[in-house]
Amino acid sequence: MAVHPITIAGEPVLHTRATAVEHFDDALRTLIADMYETMDEAHGVGLAAPQIGVGLRIFVYGMANDDGVPPRGVLVNPTLVTSKVSGAEPDEDESEGCLSFPGESFPLKRAEWVKINGFDGAGDPVEFEATGWFARCMQHEFDHLNGTLYVDRLNPRFARKAKKASKTNGWGQPGLTWMPGVDPDPFGH
Ligand SMILES: [Zn+2]
């Protein structure tokens, strides 16, 4: 197993629709193990394959929840159904962050409920419903598989702030990564 560098906004794989996993083999299981290790080293609550430069439809998560779902898991080739997203302005306590937009956070409305279907690393079906922050996590990670970052969904006010942050940090170009456990933790965890 190995910790991988985490891609930063501007790296093309983060902005491209990922492709479906076709083979549930040892290579897939090694990749998933590396994703868990990288997520843990980065103190993240979720990590999608494009965030380690792999354009496949896989994410892992680590988040306690009130939905009776195991607090750690992997979704391969997931589908997602959500409740309607409120059109109200987001509150500050709805701030989201992303390891690929490191150190920043911006408020965003998300659906309160989702249902997710997919497969685990062995190819067995996984299905559950999620609410609240766990539902937010699922939406965030699922977005990664479609080349969407949460900053792409911000309202105009926060989108401007995110754009400014990206410019200040020198992001928005290919080739940028940070290394969990080596570089300072961007979120101070
Ligand atoms: Zn993210």
Image (spheres, rainbow, N blue to C red):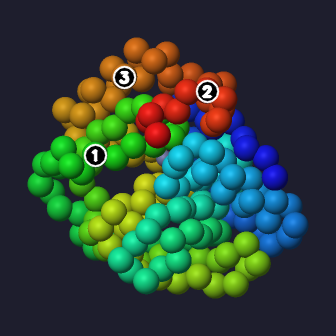
* Residue occupying the point 58% across, 43% down: 42
Which of the two discs, 2 and 3, labels the residue nearer the N terminus? 3
Amino acid, disc 2: Asp
Graded by Cα atoms within 10 Å as few (under 14), some (14 to 19) or many (20 or more), the crowding at tag 2 reads few
Describe residue 56's horizontal placement relative to residue 132 as left or right. Answer: right
In this orientation, does residue 31 appear?
yes
* Residue occupying the point 72% across, 41% down: 4
Name the quadrant containing residue 155. top left
- Mark 2 or 1, closer to the camera: 2
* Residue occupying the point 67% across, 75% down: 120
Viewer-proximal residue among 143 and 34? 34
In this orientation, does residue 114 appear?
no
Residue at the spot of label 2:
183
Amino acid, disc 3: Ala
Are the residues flagged by discs 3 and 1 in contact, CB closer than 8 Å?
no
* Residue occupying the point 15% across, 48% down: 91
Name the quadrant containing residue 153. top left
Relative to 118, say whether 41 is above or below. Answer: above
Residue at the spot of label 3:
165
Q: Position of residue 178 (x, y in %)?
A: 62, 29
Which of the two discs, 3 and 1, labels the residue nearer the N terminus? 1
Q: Residue furthest left?
A: 88
Which numbered marker is on residue 7?
none
- Mark 2 or 3, closer to the camera: 2
Residue at the spot of label 1:
95
